[in-house]
Amino acid sequence: MGRTWSKTIPGQVQFFSSEGSDTSVPIPVVALRGVDDSYPPQKKSFMMLKYMHDHYLDQYEWFMRADDDVYIKGDRLESFLRSLNSSEPLFLGQTGLGTTEEMGKLAGRCSAGWCRTSGSVCGRCTPRTRTWRWGAACAGSRACSASGLTRTWSKTIPGQVQFFSSEGSDTSVPIPVVALRGVDDSYPPQKKSFMMLKYMHDHYLDQYEWFMRADDDVYIKGDRLESFLRSLNSSEPLFLGQTGLGTTEEMGKLALEPGENFCMGGPGVIMSREVLRRVVPHIGECLREMYTTHEDVEVGRCVRRFAGVQCVWSYEMQQLFYENYEQNKKGYIRDLHNSKIHRAITLHPNKNPPYQYRLHSYVLSRRIAALRHRTVQLHRELVLMGRYSGTEVQKEDLQLGVPPSFTRFQPRQREEVLEWEFLTGKHLYSAADGQPPRRGLDSAQREALDDIVMQVMEMINANAKARGRVIDFKEVQYGYRRVNPMYGAEYILDLLLLYKKHKGKKVTVPVRRHAYLQQSFSRTQFVEHEELDAQDLADRINQESGSLSFLSNSLKKLVPFQLPGSKNEHREPKETKINILIPLSGRFDMFVRFMGHFEKTCLIPSQNVKLVVLLFNSDSNPDKAKQVELMRDYRAKYPKADMQVLPVSGEFSRALALEVGSSQFSNESLLFFCDVDLVFTAEFLQRCRANAVLGQQIYFPIIFSQYDPKIVYSGNVPSDNHFAFTQKTGFWRNYGFGITCIYKGDLVRVGGFDVSIQGWGLEDVDLFNKVVQAGLKTFRSQEVGVVHVHHPVFCDPNLDPKQYKMCLGSKASTYGSTQQLAEMWLEKNDPSYSKSSNNNGSVRTA
């Protein structure tokens, strides 16, 4: 059992044996003094109880004795015991009366409160009800908020939920509304709160053990609340909630004596049946003697006066009944990714239904994550049990049940080593080729990190109550992360924490801890976010093959078939025309190459595109006449093609050229901002159409940029095969935004280009920032259909310093890969270096 269930016990497991037993074995054995191994082991059992009493009485709430051939489910045991009140005298187990032969010979009798039933078995005389009732005080106009509650958390309540409103309220709405007699919607709702308590007392006092009052903008975790209340004794007068004393401005004005408090109404107030029984007969007197306008203060005063109790002074209540104290709060809880949200039973406020749905969705996602984590644990147990029992384990269990370790994957060569990325709370640093050295954590990465930290804090604080301390998270000092595509994400984090001791002498000190974490993948799941319409899909499949842009070329061979009920007529929808804009000044040889490629890709296949060459006519463009002549020749060769040369005045400015060119089109026109040193495929044009959505999304493809072929191929430059994607031949421009597919209407909406930017660079970053600030979606992915052909880069020293620095950085990145440049340097400077011993080949990246 030391290798099986004992590890799941949230406490301590010990084995009790006779005096003189060997305690050096690798299991926790206790040798009991004066006890031998005689059978039956009556003395051993009693002395074991005495040992636990003498050593652990103040450390643990529950004590268990079992035989050494038992199997215990630790998680189920913990959940069961946490639902009980350990302060009560409870003795639990399977009831026994002895065998048939032993009946009447064991000197057994029914204890007080139990009765003899059939078969001479003892049974409880009067069963108790363990349910509860919830009520919300709300105005008649808040039905919309109530509907948000009924569609989210109210279904999880193991009791009854009602909404209390004023007299004359519409009770025909599809929510359980109670119209209180003699009550209006005036604020503050003091009378409404007291009359709500009276209504629950008069109608449900004998049916429920717990009664709760809360605002209608609260969120309650029903399962957590049930577990919490079942651990308490409802026969005692208990008044629960987050303790309040009033704001700083109200101190001394609420008629509270030193040591007096109240339960804050927003996150919820819970009363035991005994409190409600004592208070309600005196509600009239409480209504006549009110000292403030705060209904929660007055309810607390009435409870303290007539029930003899007040809101529980407890640090834990502040966590269980969560009130949002964020600065500039806007009526909802913004930050959901923290342990406080996860520990809380009630959360307040969420003023509108969309906020309730958002929070409910997050709570459900955390439950799903917990279930997935449980499945991974079960896979690991299956693998472990299979190893112990010598049985065959299924392949899926072997894959998902590998125990956590940073060495689960064993690389066989340098290229297979998974590199770590360094991170802080705000930035991510990477040494991988094609990645910027430093970049900010995006929202998905930040949420993932927040969730991981939250899970770590939950594990640290698992037994915080028993230990009398709680540890709060402050920040991530630094860390490392990587993703193992076979097993999951791996993290090493240096955490700054705050240790708070609330038992005995209170202590608060900052501490640092290292956390070594793995977030394992669970079983792969496929989910359709939108249900497909079968007839619509059939019609799309049965269209002409030329319109099947959503299928690959290999799948189009399977298309000429008819599905049942589909139409026999084929119609080819007209493709959106792409308007290709190319700023041009000089660079005639590159323009010749571009037009040759454009002819093969667009002119010969008659693609639905328009080419607009934005030609600068300044004196610095000596190739202007030849460029115009070349365009005239292509127009003569392809008279039906839509091609245009648009002159642009002034010195070269990409921003100015694209602004002038885009002004020629309507808001419904799709624009493709291109450069003369690019080559692209017909498949990219289809993705340009698909990924740019008018009024919603702009496509910023991540293009592949070639290294200098003279360095890559050591002077032996191959033929024009530009679409070779390896770490040796080029890199992905993750930080480039100049190549764009955007509708003219969206360009106008974001404010267009900054035409004051002269020369090379910055205009693309400026446009990208404008798109983000305008609230439009940006779609980015590695685009295998566009390649930036290498060419020598010249950086004008007269550029703006920021542009000049960016230009030099771009120029340096085009020479060759880090590995190849290092090999060249070593060959030249280290005579002992052998390239053959480090030749690991190229790795395809697309």
Image (tube, grey):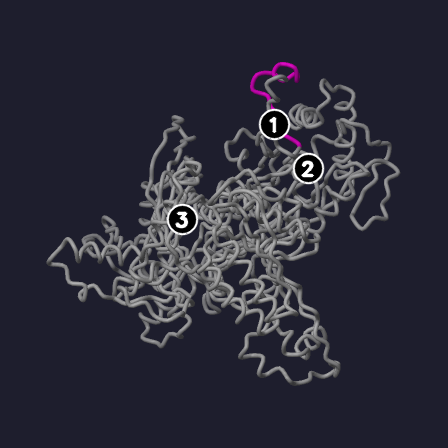
Of the 4 image quadrants, the one containing the N terminus is: bottom left
On the picture, is 311 further left or further right than 483?
right
Count neighbours of disc 1 (C-alpha within 10 A) and say few if under 14, some if 14 to 19, many if 20 or more.
many
Q: Name the outermost residue toward the bottom.
A: 561
Residue at left offset 44%, top offset 40%? 803
Q: How far apart are marks 3 and 2 (CA)?
A: 37 Å
Residue 263 magenta:
yes
Marking on residue 63? 3
On the picture, is 839 further left or further right than 633?
left
In the foreground, 464 or 35: 464
Q: Where is residue 260 in the image (x, y as percent from the top left)?
A: 59, 21
- Residue 405 occupies quadrant: bottom left
In the foreground, 679 or 750: 679
Q: Which of marks 2 and 3 precedes in the sequence?
A: 3
On the picture, is 364 further left or further right than 807?
right
Q: Provide the major secondary structure of the magenta segment.
A: loop
Q: Position of residue 297 (x, y in %)?
A: 67, 24
Residue 648 magenta:
no
Residue at left offset 46%, top offset 58%? 588
Q: Give the range drawn in magenta.
A: 251-265
On the picture, is 539 further left or further right than 634?
right
Q: Disc 1 designates what residue?
A: 310
Q: Name the outermost residue toward the left.
A: 832
Identity of the amino acid at label 3? Phe
Q: Name the outermost residue toward the right.
A: 168
Q: Which tag is nearer the camera, tag 1 or tag 3?
A: 1
Q: Disc 2 designates what residue?
A: 214
Q: Which of marks 2 and 1 precedes in the sequence?
A: 2
Q: Which tag is nearer the camera, tag 3 or tag 2?
A: 2
- Residue 531 occupies quadrant: bottom right
Say whether residue 692 is visible.
yes
Q: Position of residue 28 (x, y in %)?
A: 27, 53
